[in-house]
């Protein structure tokens, strides 16, 4: 794995949000094949709003201090985890999840049922499905699997 720096975002500003939205979009286009081109701009707006209010925002940066991944945590729940498409498979996601579990007591998350790569990753990291919802939190017909850390 490359050398990465993990840090909690203290100052939330538009420049950082723009960088994180690029990561979000490259990640989504690489994994969320069920989304349409019309879905992405709508979701981008929701993600930008979430970045501003999520309790804990963690960013992984590469050697040049460029953001390559981020996660958002709220009350022990992983609300978002996105890795830039060029850094997928480099161990960044595993590092972030492990950090979130250890430092922020992450014990649950939701994953799109139509994203089998993410489901497999979270299962590998020790999470298990305990419930399914037909719709996401915004009421979109994207079935969600609710997962929790195995004890």
Image (cartoon, rainbow, N blue to C red):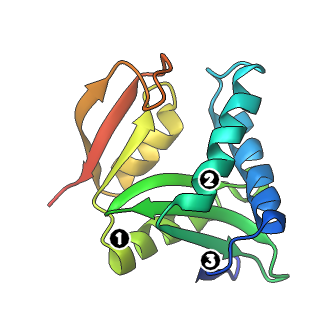
x and y, in percent, of residue 103 in the image:
38, 80
Q: Secondary structure at mark 2?
A: strand
* Visible residue check, residue 20: yes
Q: Earlier in the sequence, mark 2 or mark 3?
A: 3
Q: Secondary structure at mark 1?
A: helix
Which residue corresponds to mark 2? 82
Which residue corresponds to mark 3? 9
Q: Is residue 37 left or right of residue 111?
A: right
> Residue drawn 29% across and 44% down?
147
x and y, in percent, of residue 93 in the image:
55, 61
Residue 113 lies, with reference to residue 103, above or below; the image says above
* Visible residue check, residue 91: no
Q: Which mark is residue 4?
A: none
Residue 143 lies, with reference to residue 41, above or below; the image says above
Q: Quadrant of the C terminus?
A: bottom left
Q: Disc 1 to disc 3, how far (Cα)?
A: 17 Å
Q: Residues within 10 Å of mark 1 (few under 14, many from 20)?
A: some
x and y, in percent, of residue 62 in the image:
76, 77
> Residue drawn 36% across and 49% down?
109
Q: Quadrant of the N terminus?
A: bottom right
Q: Residues within 10 Å of mark 3 (few under 14, many from 20)?
A: few
Q: Secondary structure at mark 3?
A: loop
Q: Nearer the viewer, residue 110 or 50?
A: 50
Q: Disc 2 to disc 3, how far (Cα)?
A: 15 Å
Q: Please tell me whether mark 2 or mark 3 is closer to you in this view.
A: 3
Q: Nearer the viewer, residue 20 or 50?
A: 50
Q: Is residue 127 left or right of residue 120?
A: left
Residue 13 lies, with reference to residue 34, above or below; the image says below
> Residue drawn 45% across and 52% down?
79
Q: Which mark is residue 101?
A: 1
Residue 135 lies, with reference to residue 89, above or below; the image says above
């Amino acid at each position: 794995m490359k050398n990465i720096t993990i840090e909690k975002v203290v100052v939330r500003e538009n420049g950082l949000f723009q960088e994180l939205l690029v990561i979000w979009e490259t990640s989504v286009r690489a994994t969320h094949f069920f989304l349409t081109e019309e879905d992405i701009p709508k979701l981008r707006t929701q993600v930008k709003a979430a970045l501003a209010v999520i309790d804990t925002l963690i960013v992984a940066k590469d050697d040049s201090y460029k953001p390559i991944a981020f996660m958002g945590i709220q009350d022990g729940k992983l609300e978002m985890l996105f890795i830039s498409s060029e850094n997928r498979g480099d161990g960044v996601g595993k590092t972030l999840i492990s950090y979130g579990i250890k430092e922020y007591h992450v014990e649950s998350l939701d994953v799109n049922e139509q994203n089998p790569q993410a489901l497999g990753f979270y299962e590998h990291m020790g999470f298990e499905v305990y419930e399914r919802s037909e719709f996401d939190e915004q009421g979109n017909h994207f079935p969600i699997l609710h997962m929790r850390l195995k004890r």
